[in-house]
Image (cartoon, rainbow, N blue to C red):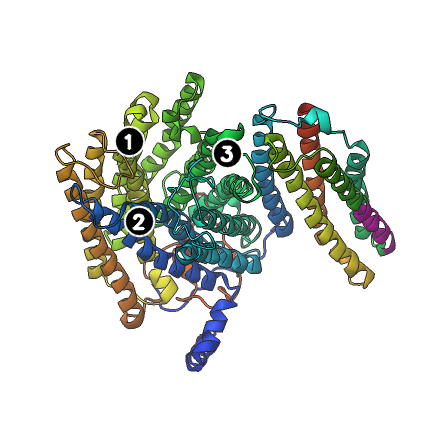
Amino acid sequence: MSATSMTVAEGRIEWDRPDRGRVGMFSLIAAEAAIFTIFVVAYLFYMGKSLTGPMPKDVLSVPIFYTICLLSSSLTIHLAAKLLRRGSVRAFKIWWFATITLGAAFMYGTTTEWHRLIYHDGLTISTNLFGTTYYSLVGLHGFHVVIGLMSLSIVMALTLLGHVRSEHAERIDVLSLYWHFVDVVWIGVFTVVYVIGR
Amino acid sequence: MSTDALALSRTELASRPIVARLHDWVTTVDHKRLGILYIIYAMVFLVIAGLEATIIRIQLIRPHNDFVSPQVFNRLFTMHGTTMIFFVIMPVLFGFANYLIPLMIGARDMAFPRLNAFSFWMTAFGGLLLYFSLVGANGLYGAGNAPDVGWFAYAPLTSRTFSVGHSTDFWTLALLVSGFGSIGTATNIIATVLCMRCPGMTLAKMPLFAWLNLVMACLVILCVSPLTAAQIMLVIDRYLGGHFFDTQAGGSAVIWMHFFWVFGHPEVYVLVLPAFAFASEIIPVFSRKPIFGYPVMVGATIAIGFISMSVWAHHMFTVGMSSAANNFFVISTMAIAVPTGIKIFNWLGTMWGGKIEFKTPMLFCVAFLFQFLIAGLTGIMQGAAPFDWHLGSSYFVVAHFHYVIVGGILFCLFGAFYYWFPKMSGKMYSETLGKLHFWLFIVGFHLTFDFMHIPGLLGMPRRIYTYEPGRGWDTWNFIVTVGVFFQAAGILVFVGNLLWSYFRGKAAGSDPWDSWTLEWSTNSPPPAYNFASIPVVKSRRPLWDLKHPDDPDWKYE
């Protein structure tokens, strides 16, 4: 019971721990996945329970082109991160920009779909249960795409200003994990909304 | 080393103007300061929510009492429950986790210090938002005050029709905001435990405190997120005219119950696992023995984590589910008693044959063992669906969960306060006052919560404003309320003890309990950098190894 502090043995041993950025991102992804799960459960639970129209089969069309855009952006971001790790910032820039373009194209698709649904079909979030669950689930996903696009754009701006180099590849990897997650969630949302729910 | 430098920096600190010192606290990203901020913040809300409980009990002391109006009574029990769960127990547990985990695993800070500060301020502003409802909820509608829908806010009571003004909105937003804070802190705890351990500290050599908080953080990630989702749905319903919980448009009120309890039941384990963590550190030190069955303790913790995700609908037996669902949730509820029982036996095994010292922290932990066992037994009673049909929404339920939260969690928490107070403040508390606190509180606790079971069995429903005389409830309610004053006296002694000791107490030294985990190897209070050099550990009890070089633990582990 000494009054001053003690020093616990110092020494050298083999010591390897996981990267905290990846662990933090996986925790965030788990939390987000839980949020999406609840919204998906609500969507499935309320399928076909709307008391009034419009119904999904009348108004929804399958957004195949924009889905391909979003899913292929996973490929481009993977390529970009890989190229940065190898040190070619120029190629990274090109593929990173391609990712942003594909993500933006997907958001454009959602915007036009919503515009058509609201102005042409008269479906809003308060119209019926389908509207409530559809807009909140697809909207929640769209919100995540927008957050992702903002983060990607910040990296793009930093790259153009010459601040991103190959030693940042680890961090870029962490960000790309988030983008992959957003894409995987879309597979779930797409299946629920456009395949099962239609 | 730096004793002189430390003394110098302290006099410098003391001479700085108060605004500058406050600025240091507000902008801090140091895990120890944030931990203390969490704890002080929770203490303030503990007093507020405790006063609310006292008013509730004064109202119920005799039949036909009208100490407060029925409307105020509804607000009081809603605010009491919401505050205690979200703004007292969770923050205080996060505070201890924040303060202790980096010290215990030999790290200099959490994995994400700025996220840590962000999470604290989110939680803090969530609490302020909840209480701002007292002035803000009236809003433009000229109706509404503090939330009055109960802490689980069942639909359709929360719809615009039945909950006018902004009172429910404040409730929703407060929980949404503090929920983001909780998810941030949980992320931080997971990353810290997995990625910041000092060399040699493999997962199997971590203190149990770190293990239990790791599982707690995983549960927070998985259970607070559904609550966040449900709150988003409620906001959509209330502000955008959505129909999630709107039964008039085909929506379901029962699905809110499911979403809420998917959060609500794991939440109990979020609160109790850190309490287990305190007990797992305190009991071995005051029994002078290493923890009994470390690997089994870790396994049982993980089992509790998994099972707790599948028991939520035992809160809903009285709603009317299919018998298949009832059976499933009865069985899973019974199953969770197994790992919890394992833990209780392991703590007893630790004490068995030990040289037990009944210092204040140990007293609280021993009381916890008995009380948590009883709380578990009444839990099994209600876990049986047919019996729950009799007990559901009665005072028996209130008695049961207060037995868990006060008798289990709060007792461990008091133990933790006394055990780590010397480390956090550098001062020793008064053992006499600590024991006085313990005896006042244990008498008050048993008067209140033992006798609360009986009116519940006799059919007294929870959340009633008042009751008729002559139903056999009168005497019990009187005794229950009398107990509250003993508990309040105990809390006063507790706060007085800590304040007096902080200013006038004797210096505690770095290791007053002759303990074994790393936080006791550094100064009390620890310097900003925690450890002058990062420690290297070889066993679960690094300080034992240091004190007993002839017989170190790592030879046997």
Residue at horizontal 62%, vertical 43%? A29
Name the residue type under label 3: Phe
Dot 2: within a 10 Å radius of its alpha carbon, few (fewer than 14), some, or many (20 or more) residues? some
Q: CA distance from mark 1 to mark 2?
A: 34 Å
> Please, what is the dominant secondary structure of the magenta stretch?
helix
Disc number for residue B245: 3
Task: Determine which residue is flagged by label 2.
Answer: B72
Name the residue type under label 1: Leu
Residue at horizontal 72%, vertical 46%? A176
Q: Say whether residue B422 is left or right of residue B238.
A: left
Of A147 and B336, the residue lying toward us: A147
Task: Determine which residue is flagged by label 1.
Answer: B377
Q: Mark 3 — on which chain does it sit?
A: B
Dot 1: within a 10 Å radius of its alpha carbon, few (fewer than 14), some, or many (20 or more) residues? some
Residues at discs 1 and 3 both on one chain: yes
What span is in magenta? A90-101
Q: Mark 1 — on which chain does it sit?
A: B
Q: Quadrant of the N terminus of chain A?
A: bottom left
Q: Secondary structure at mark 1?
A: helix
